[in-house]
């Protein structure tokens, strides 16, 4: 393998990284070869390990770093980046292809299930809010004649409002939990890959 | 080497390497590899981190027709290195003391 072959293989594993991380990584490996010089090229390739090994190690370090920085609010894309890097790291993990496809499918289905749950919860909570305003309207226009019907309508309206808001809160928790789940599973897969 | 080298220790070693003389990535890397079983993919983020923390600054210089990126220790880096050296001496003294039987926790 020559230096250029090495770098182009590495490039394939890292191309999908966020621009800045990609550039830093490729720049460093290019510099490494440059400074090692052509006479040490074979030695340099041996030191670096195969492009896949190097990429896997790099991606799992980067993943740890991004998770650590997860509380840094200055980067609005951090969740998307973490999930993206997890997937790249899993793809570079030394795992047999069928198993790899199975693992990625599990993560994808988990994501779809979670996403559907979130959509369902959001729809129900919006319905409750709409129903609540409906009741409120009815209360003042149709049911205001008697105190008992008025309070029944108002009560129903407040009940729907409460349920809607509660469900909205649950949805936010659900979304956070889903993200955490995907990160933990990916980390587990990536770390297992490293041990073997 | 049998004992693992933590990334904090590697930060200390990198700063110590460039203290007396500016050095370039490959040379730093080869020196670190004398003691630590570390991959390049782990090492360069540490270098990057030290650079971001302004402990190191870089410049490019040509050497025998090859470009080299040199690392230079900043004043901030010198302060940090002094702290790390002090911490390392404390650590080393304690380890040596325990290993040689000079230091022990006295139960009273």
Image (spheres, coloured by chain):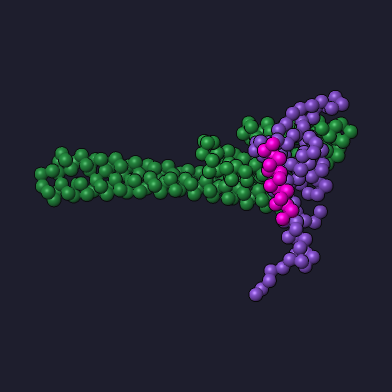
Asked if residue A87 shows in the view, the reply is: no
Residue A19 screen position, x and y as percent: 63, 31
Q: Nearer the viewer, residue A155 or B78?
A: B78
Give me the residue at 81% from left, 45% from top. B33
> Is residue A123 shown above or below B6?
above
* Colour assignment, chain B: purple
Query: What residue span does the magenta drawing correspond to?
Result: B75-90
Taking A180 as reference, is A65 left or right?
right
Residue A16 screen position, x and y as percent: 64, 34
Residue A58 screen position, x and y as percent: 69, 41
Q: Which chain is green?
A: A
Residue at the far bottom: name it.
B108
Dividing the picture into quadrants, the one containing residue A14 is top right
Dividing the picture into quadrants, the one containing residue B4 is bottom right
Taking A20 as reference, is B36 left or right?
right
Q: Quadrant of the N terminus of chain A?
A: top right
Asked if residue B19 shows in the view, the reply is: yes
Residue A153 screen position, x and y as percent: 19, 46
Magenta stretch: residue B88 in it?
A: yes
Magenta stretch: residue B11 in it?
A: no
Give me the residue at 26% from left, 43% from top. A132
Give me the residue at 25% from left, 47% from top. A158
Query: What kind of secondary structure does the magenta stretch mostly adopt?
Result: helix
Taking A71 as reference, is A137 left or right?
left
């Amino acid at each position: 393998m020559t230096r250029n072959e090495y770098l182009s293989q590495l490039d394939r594993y890292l191309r999908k990284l966020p621009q800045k991380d990609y550039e830093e990584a490729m720049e460093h490996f290019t510099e490494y070869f440059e400074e090692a010089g052509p006479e040490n090229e074979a030695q340099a390739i041996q030191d670096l390990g195969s492009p896949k090994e190097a990429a896997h190690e790099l991606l799992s370090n980067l993943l740890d770093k991004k998770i650590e920085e997860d509380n840094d609010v200055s980067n609005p894309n951090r969740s998307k980046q973490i999930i993206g890097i997890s997937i790249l790291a899993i793809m570079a993990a030394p795992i047999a292809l069928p198993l790899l496809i199975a693992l990625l499918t599990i993560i994808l289905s988990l994501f779809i299930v979670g996403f559907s749950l979130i959509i369902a919860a959001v729809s129900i909570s919006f319905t409750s809010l709409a129903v609540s305003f409906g009741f409120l309207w009815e209360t003042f226009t149709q049911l205001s004649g008697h105190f008992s019907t008025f309070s029944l309508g108002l009560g129903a309206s407040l009940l729907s409002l409460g349920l809607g808001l509660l469900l909205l809160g649950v949805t936010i928790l659900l979304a956070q939990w889903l993200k955490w789940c995907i990160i933990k599973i990916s980390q587990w897969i990536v770390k297992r890959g490293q041990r073997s | 080497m049998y004992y693992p080298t933590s990334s904090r220790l590697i930060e200390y070693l990198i700063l110590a390497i460039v203290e007396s003389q500016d050095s370039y990535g490959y040379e730093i890397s080869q020196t670190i590899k004398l003691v630590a079983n570390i991959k390049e993919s782990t090492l360069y983020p540490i270098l990057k981190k030290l650079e971001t923390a302004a402990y190191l600054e870089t410049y490019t210089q040509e050497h025998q027709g090859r470009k080299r990126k040199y690392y230079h220790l900043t004043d901030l880096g010198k302060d940090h290195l002094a702290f790390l050296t002090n911490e390392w001496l404390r650590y080393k003294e304690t380890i040596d003391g325990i290993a040689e039987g000079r230091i022990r926790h006295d139960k009273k």
